[in-house]
Image (cartoon, rainbow, N blue to C red):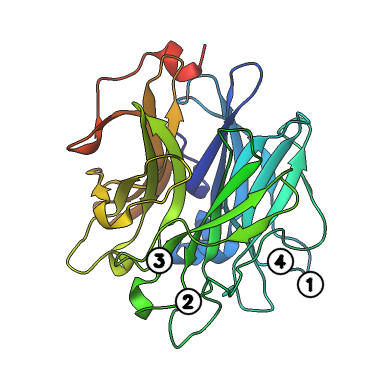
């Protein structure tokens, strides 16, 4: 478990180094804010390391908002970390700026040689919403311009890289436009925005998307709060399927994951083909918690979806 006495911790993502250690990157904000709803506009990207995904050692923050004026000078939000073919590490993140009062989301990049010291790539965002397919800021339709939570993974056929994004299509009822945004790149630096990999299915947005192949099935993990879930549903965590990791993702048939204490979880692989979830505990007894869980072992069942299983061994969790 990762709990900071002076900071709330929420969305997280992970990378494993050459020594088998896990690096957690996570959003954090000071508990001195008192009201957890204020944390989003104060978010920085924290960093911790672990050998077993249970005991964590805090490292310096990976990234903080840029100096003003800058496109990401208000807050740095959820992203992902991958290793490129040049052996450098690439941290893709969401940024929001003061100029638009944090209402317009864009995706940026920082790079590192050691997973500890990070430098922004360029002075501007890397990937922005394309109005050909995606909704731009329109406060009469939605409360923000959604283009966040990048999840980057290599094409399984070796054809560059894919990025999934929390996005909204530019057509249809305003509260049901959530789709899986998509962009591709040959080199992790130059990106082309593509049409979405799903069609609207009643969700306002699909937050923190992640793709993994679990027990032979390509899965899309995502989450949504009660206000943006399909009408009549109070579920928060979901898993959808597709024929391949390229999609298209069948969001209309998405199955809920029955772990009501979690939000924004990530699937992490063990060394023996097993999988676990780590997310943050949002509320307990009516109070915001803001801490990361220990690994929760899961498996995929074609009838029930993503379900818990017997715990994976410490050696599997460590990747040893």
Q: Is residue 217 visible?
A: yes
Checking the image for residue 170, the label placed there is 2
Among the two numbered marks 1 and 3 on one chain, the one whose residue lies closer to the N terminus: 1
| Mark 2 Cα-neighbour bin, 10 Å: few <14, some 14–19, many ≥20 | some
Residue drawn at 38 percent across, 63 percent down: 199
Tell which circle, 2 or 1, labels the residue nearer the N-terminal end.
Answer: 1
In the image, taking residue 220 as reference, residue 51 lies left or right, namely right
**x and y, in percent, of residue 88 in the image:** 76, 33
Which residue lies under the disc numbered 3?
A: 178
Q: CA distance from mark 2 to mark 3?
A: 10 Å
Which residue is denoted by mark 4 in the rendering? Answer: 73
Who is closer to the viewer here, 216 or 29? 216
Q: Secondary structure at mark 1?
A: loop
Q: CA distance from mark 1 to mark 4?
A: 7 Å
Q: Position of residue 203 (x, y in %)?
A: 33, 65
- Does 78 appear above or below 154? below
Residue under the image location 71 percent in, 66 percent down? 73
Q: Secondary structure at mark 2?
A: loop
Badge 3: how crowded within 10 Å, few (<14), some, or many (20+)?
many
Q: Label 2, label 1: how many angstroms apart (C-alpha)?
A: 29 Å
Which mark is drawn over residue 69? Answer: 1
Relative image position of residue 53 (x, y in whole percent) = 47, 25
Q: Earlier in the sequence, mark 4 or mark 3?
A: 4
Q: Helix, strand, or loop for circle 4?
A: loop
Q: Is residue 120 left or right of residue 254?
A: right
Residue at mark 4 to residue at mark 3: CA–CA distance: 26 Å
Q: Are marks 1 and 4 in contact (CB under 8 Å)?
A: yes
């Amino acid at each position: 478990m990762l709990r900071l006495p002076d900071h709330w911790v929420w969305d997280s993502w992970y990378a494993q180094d050459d020594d088998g250690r896990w690096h957690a990157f996570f959003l954090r904000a000071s508990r001195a804010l008192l009201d957890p709803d204020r944390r989003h506009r104060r978010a920085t990207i924290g960093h911790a390391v672990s050998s077993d995904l249970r005991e964590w050692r805090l490292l310096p923050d990976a990234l903080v908002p840029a100096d003003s004026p800058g496109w990401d000078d208000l807050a740095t939000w959820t992203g992902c970390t991958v290793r490129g073919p040049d052996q450098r590490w690439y941290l893709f993140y969401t940024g929001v700026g003061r100029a638009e009062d944090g209402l317009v989301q864009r995706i940026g990049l920082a790079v590192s040689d050691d997973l500890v010291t990070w430098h922004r790539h360029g002075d501007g965002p890397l990937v922005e919403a394309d109005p050909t397919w995606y909704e731009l800021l329109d406060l009469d339709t939605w409360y923000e311009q959604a283009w966040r939570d990048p999840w980057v993974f290599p094409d399984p056929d070796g054809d560059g890289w894919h990025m999934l994004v929390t996005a909204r299509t530019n057509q249809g009822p305003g509260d049901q436009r959530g789709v899986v945004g998509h962009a591709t790149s040959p080199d992790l630096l130059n990106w082309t925005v593509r049409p979405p990999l799903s069609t609207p299915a009643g969700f306002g947005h699909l937050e923190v998307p992640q793709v993994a192949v679990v027990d032979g099935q390509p899965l899309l993990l995502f989450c949504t709060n009660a206000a943006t879930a399909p009408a009549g549903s109070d579920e928060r965590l979901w898993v959808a399927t597709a024929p391949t990791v390229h999609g298209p993702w069948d969001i209309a048939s998405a199955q809920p994951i029955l772990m009501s204490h979690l939000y924004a979880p990530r699937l992490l692989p063990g060394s023996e083909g097993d999988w676990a979830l780590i997310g943050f505990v949002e509320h307990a007894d009516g109070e915001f918690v803001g801490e990361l869980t220990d690994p929760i072992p899961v498996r995929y069942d074609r009838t029930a979806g993503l379900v818990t299983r017997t715990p994976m061994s410490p050696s599997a969790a460590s990747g040893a």
